Image (spheres, helix red, strand yellow):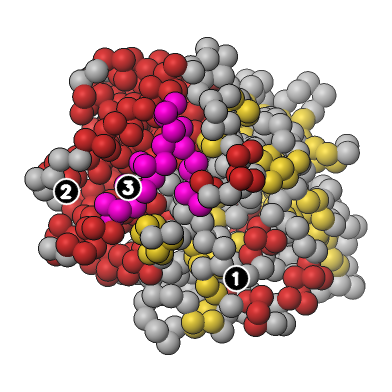
């Protein structure tokens, strides 16, 4: 019967083509009318009189997956340049939409003025909604984790349209969403690349429209494949779980790690050690090595013309520890990195290394105020001007959680350091006292204890600290606070498939804010045995993974990504404001493997291993390896990979390049993952 149904579906597709009738997509195959259909393929419209549609084959592949193969021919006597447009219209009323890595139901979040490192950057505009100035937003496939993908859904069903990666002509594309007069969404794929009405070219900047064309000589044809997939939501607003399953299969997503676990561990340790910095007699870890002009690039404080001029001079392009900063969590990861150094010290018996690692903790612990807060960048303790600097929940949550983990590590090795628990307790007690039913834990605070920025999901970074502190102390107030915060932030944000404002320099929809919800939900599940926390862990994993790339965009031979064989697959987009890729997925593998073990769903481990494979690319392995004609420190890795026409770090807007800042968090995340999988008895390579 299954084979008969497939034959009938193919036959129906052929009949539709011959009679020029509309094609209707059902839940389990093509259907003859709107009755029982979820979406329809709208008729092709010729962009030029010389072009004809010579073939359009629609085939049901099973599992709610369809293939559309279209061939256009130039029947004229002269070359024709054009854009091919494919449209699929929903036949249900969608309540939610996603363009992976780009647009999460309109990017509707206003976090107010962005404040980063004490600098007010103002209100940063990002593409919102599906249109701007009366025109649909059209974005390149290079920006979307699934190529040129649009997904719409309601509580009962979902539909996605995306480009195939079977050929370059299929893959090189763009997408948009439109709405008809009845409010139903129309999914659009444009070939080749168009970005309109503007290109989102850098943080908060809308640049000129960008457009490429297909050019056909007389008699030439153009063929491209697209996919329509039925995506029933696993939970309301979570049709992306089905989409990811379809994408893995139809795009044949795969990537193997380019180095084994032992080498990744050794290189991570090497780079972390290179950041050790004696500051006012105390060992700390510098946040990064960078170019001297990086600060101005990162904050978009110089023009592209000025950047081009500076790049001519070695003074501006040297890689070093300029203006050293020592951050407890977030980008600097002093506590996590120090814990990884201590882990290495215990393995090797290196007492000098252990002393430095403990010294990092001692320095921050000594700077904590009576109310539990502290300057999350250690150097801010020294200058009067830093009295106005705010502290953030992201850093404080990382700091408290890592203090608990360091306490546990030391205890495993026969060392009692209660100061770590006291430090974590004081931070957690502050936020328990300051909890607000309207905004939770807030985002940023004056060191005196007054809230400054209240909006966002960033308070989720406190939940792992609360849960893990409960595991050590047994004090129920910490478990109760963790559970209350989990309920609050899921109800407000993650149940709606959104996380916001967790990246301190971004006030927007983002990715990394979801990670503490995965981690803390697993912890709460182990503590309570309550299945709702396992479901919440899956939701956090799904949201984070919706930012993952399931394919490699095509890059020009002169680009970094092509020259160094760097793959976007497994990389994760940063945020709606920063439409590029970073190695944040390097933290995910252990959690995702555990999630598969607990749920029996192999997709989570597959995704986690893909993220790991991406995260070990582009690491400097030895002296003599040059990138951008520069000798980088051994073990260093770029923070940003710019797969699309978006960057703050190049004078020209081009896809396929890396920046030149080498931060401490990527090796710290990789080291923690390797330590956890080793404890699980698992290898990544």
Nearer to us: label 2 or label 1: 1
> To which residue does mark 3 refer?
361
- Asked whether 507 falls inside the magenta stretch, the response is no
> To which residue does mark 2 refer?
679
The residue nearer to you, when weighing 375 against 625, is 375
- Residue at left 15%, top 40%? 416
Q: Secondary structure at mark 3?
A: helix
374 sits left or right of 408 in the view: right
**Quadrant of the rendered structure where residue 652 is?**
bottom right
**Quadrant of the rendered structure where residue 510 is?**
top right
Query: Which quadrant would the C terminus be assigned to in this image?
Result: bottom left
- Residue at left 42%, top 28%? 370
Nearer to us: label 2 or label 3: 3
- Residue at left 80%, top 59%? 210
> To which residue does mark 1 refer?
291
The image position of residue 379, as x and y in percent, is 51, 52
Mark 1 crowdedness (10 Å alpha carbons): few <14, some 14-19, many ≥20? many
Which residues lie in the magenta part?
357-379
């Amino acid at each position: 019967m299954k084979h008969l149904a497939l034959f009938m579906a193919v036959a129906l597709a052929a009949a539709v083509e011959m009679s020029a009738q509309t094609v209707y997509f059902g839940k389990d195959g093509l259907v003859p009318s709107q009755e029982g259909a979820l979406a329809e393929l709208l008729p092709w419209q010729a962009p030029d009189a010389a072009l004809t549609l010579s073939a359009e084959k629609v085939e049901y592949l099973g599992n709610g997956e369809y293939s559309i193969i279209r061939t256009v021919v130039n029947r004229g006597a002269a070359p024709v340049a054009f854009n091919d447009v494919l449209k699929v219209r929903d036949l249900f009323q969608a309540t939610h939409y996603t363009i992976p890595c780009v647009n999460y139901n309109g990017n509707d979040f206003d976090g107010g003025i962005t404040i980063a490192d004490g600098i007010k950057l103002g209100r940063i505009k990002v593409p919102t909604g599906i249109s701007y100035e009366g025109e649909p937003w059209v974005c390149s496939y290079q920006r979307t984790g699934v190529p040129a993908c649009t997904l719409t859904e309601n509580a009962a069903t979902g539909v996605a349209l995306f480009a195939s990666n079977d050929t370059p002509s299929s893959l090189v594309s763009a997408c948009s969403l439109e709405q008809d007069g009845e409010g139903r969404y129309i999914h659009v794929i444009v070939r080749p690349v168009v970005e309109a009405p503007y290109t989102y070219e850098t943080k908060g900047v809308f640049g000129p429209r960008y457009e490429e064309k297909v050019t056909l000589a007389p008699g030439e044809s153009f063929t491209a494949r697209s996919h329509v997939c039925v995506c029933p939501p696993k939970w309301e607003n979570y049709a992306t779980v089905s989409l990811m399953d379809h994408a893995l299969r139809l795009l044949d997503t795969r990537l193997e790690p380019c180095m084994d676990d032992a080498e990744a561990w050794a290189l991570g340790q090497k780079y972390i050690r290179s950041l050790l910095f004696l500051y006012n007699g105390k060992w700390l870890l510098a946040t990064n090595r960078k170019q001297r002009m990086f600060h101005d690039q990162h904050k978009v404080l110089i023009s592209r013309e000025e950047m081009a001029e500076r790049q001519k001079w070695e003074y501006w392009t040297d890689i070093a520890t300029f203006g050293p900063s020592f951050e407890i969590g977030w980008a600097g990861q002093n506590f996590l990195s120090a814990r990884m150094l201590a882990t290495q010290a215990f393995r090797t018996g290196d007492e000098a290394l252990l002393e430095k690692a403990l010294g990092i903790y001692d320095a921050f612990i000594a700077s904590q105020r009576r109310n539990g807060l502290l300057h999350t960048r250690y150097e801010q303790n020294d200058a009067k001007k830093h009295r106005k600097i705010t502290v953030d929940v992201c850093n404080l949550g990382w700091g408290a959680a890592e203090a608990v983990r360091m306490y546990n590590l030391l205890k495993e090795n026969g060392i009692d350091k209660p100061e770590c628990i006291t430090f974590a307790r004081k931070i957690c007690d502050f936020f328990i006292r300051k909890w607000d039913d309207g905004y939770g834990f807030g985002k940023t605070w004056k060191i005196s204890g007054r809230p400054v920025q209240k909006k966002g999901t960033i308070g989720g970074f406190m939940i792992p600290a609360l849960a893990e502190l409960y595991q050590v102390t047994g004090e129920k107030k910490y478990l109760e606070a963790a559970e209350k915060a989990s309920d609050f932030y899921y109800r407000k944000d993650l149940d709606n498939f959104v996380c916001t404002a967790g990246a301190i320099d971004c006030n927007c929809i983002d990715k990394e804010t979801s990670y503490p919800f995965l981690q803390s939900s697993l912890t709460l599940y182990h503590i309570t045995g309550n299945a709702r926390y396992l479901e919440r862990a899956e939701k956090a994993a799904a949201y984070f993974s919706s930012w993952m790339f399931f394919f490699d965009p095509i890059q020009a031979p002169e680009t970094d990504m092509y020259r160094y064989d760097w793959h976007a697959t497994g990389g994760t987009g940063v945020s709606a404001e920063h439409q590029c890729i970073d190695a944040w997925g390097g933290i995910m593998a252990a959690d995702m493997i555990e999630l598969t073990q607990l749920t029996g769903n192999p997709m989570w481990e597959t995704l986690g291993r893909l993220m790991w494979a991406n995260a070990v690319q582009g690491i400097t392995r030895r002296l003599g390896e040059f990138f951008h004609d520069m000798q980088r420190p051994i073990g260093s890795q770029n923070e940003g990979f710019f797969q699309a026409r978006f960057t703050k770090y190049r004078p020209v807007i081009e896809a396929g390049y890396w920046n030149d800042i080498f931060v401490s968090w990527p090796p710290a995340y990789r080291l923690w993952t390797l330590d956890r999988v080793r404890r699980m008895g698992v290898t990544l390579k």
